[in-house]
Image (cartoon, rainbow, N blue to C red):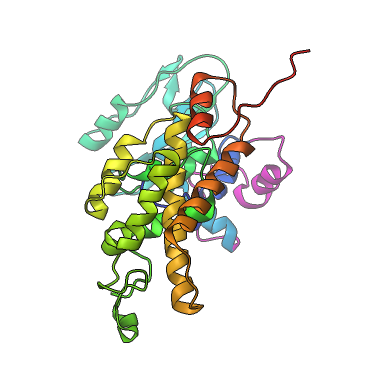
Amino acid sequence: MEEGGLGIRDILALNKALMSRHLWNVIQSNQSSIWVQWIAHTHLRHKSVWTVDAKGGSWGWRKLLRLRSALLPYIEFKPRHSDPTVFRVALAGRTFIAAKLSAVIVDGDWSWPPITDMECIEILHLLPNIHNGNDSILWRGGEFTTTVAYGIFRTPGPIVGWYPLLSGPCKIPRFSFVLWLAILGKLSTMDKPWLSHLGGVCVLCGREVETHEHLFFRCSYSRRCIRDLKEAVRFTWPNRAWGEDITWASTRWKGRHIVQAAYRALLSAIVYHIWRERNQRVFQHSERPSTTIARIAAEEIRQKILSLDLSDSVSTRGLYRLWRIPWPVRDTA
């Protein structure tokens, strides 16, 4: 949502995150899982999950093993001095050598053969200390979750300043969706090349070319809708360029205050109903006055407010007064 989307997850990244949960269970040798025991018996066969060949086994198993390199930087190993765990060392030639920990641990400390390769020497300085007790494999920074794993596999985008306009307790999804399209300039307005055969003139005012900039809110009809909203619920709107207006609204109504959330929802409602009125005039040849559009938009947000379980507070009472909602008489008996 913060990156300008609708919060829809990347299905490929999500699939890798869910698969990594299974890989994490294998890495931890979770013996409570029958599936992990079956993997150890069928695919590992006393080998380490880090050194087993990724070319063998089923398609799903190969896919699972390909996630190892992505998870490795986030895994911390804490070996004990008698641990038989298989370890791996990456040499300069990118080959991997597998051995038992017991082969390089003497008297509870690391005991490596003479090494001259500088890359290997640097790796040795990064090795964890040997400790008594059970061996442990930890997730760096806390606990492994599929949410954390999803963050590893997805490619984050830049955060946009207008994302608060699409959130809040008063939002109505279909309104937020149309507002999102309007902000991105993705509504099928008449200025689009594939709609040029329709003439391009705004059907709401019949004067100028229909663009996002014109519809919201340079058009005389949409301006009247804003004016009617101001009279109904004191809705303030600067009426500058569409992009500037969105920046203004994102800054003014970005808080968690319930009144600000209601104004965000009202913006999405009026954008939705102006766009719907435009479509009705294009496809159904029916018209409604701006007062009707403003009244419907305000009433739908009013009904949304009434559906919320809001606590008795100064903010809630102010919101009810703004929307001219009678304060409910509560039974104190």
Position of residue 194 in the picture relative to residue 26 (left or right): left
Q: Is residue 155 visible?
A: no
Residue 82 image point, x, y percent: 54, 21
Toward the viewer: 293 or 67? 293
The quarter of the rendered structure image containing the C terminus is top right
Toward the viewer: 273 or 122? 273
Q: Is residue 314 visible?
A: yes
Toward the viewer: 63 or 278? 278
Q: Which residues are magenta?
A: 30-58
Residue 8 image point, x, y percent: 49, 53
Residue 326 image point, x, y percent: 60, 30
Per the picture, the main secondary structure of the magenta-coloured stretch is loop
- Residue at (45%, 74%) from the top-left corner? 281
In the rendered view, would you say 211 is above or below 223? below
Seen as rendered, the residue at the extreme right is 333
- Residue at (38%, 66%) from the top-left corner? 187
Q: Is residue 227 magenta?
A: no
In the rendered view, would you say 196 is above or below 262? below
- Residue at (60%, 62%) from the top-left corner? 58
Toward the viewer: 18 or 38? 18
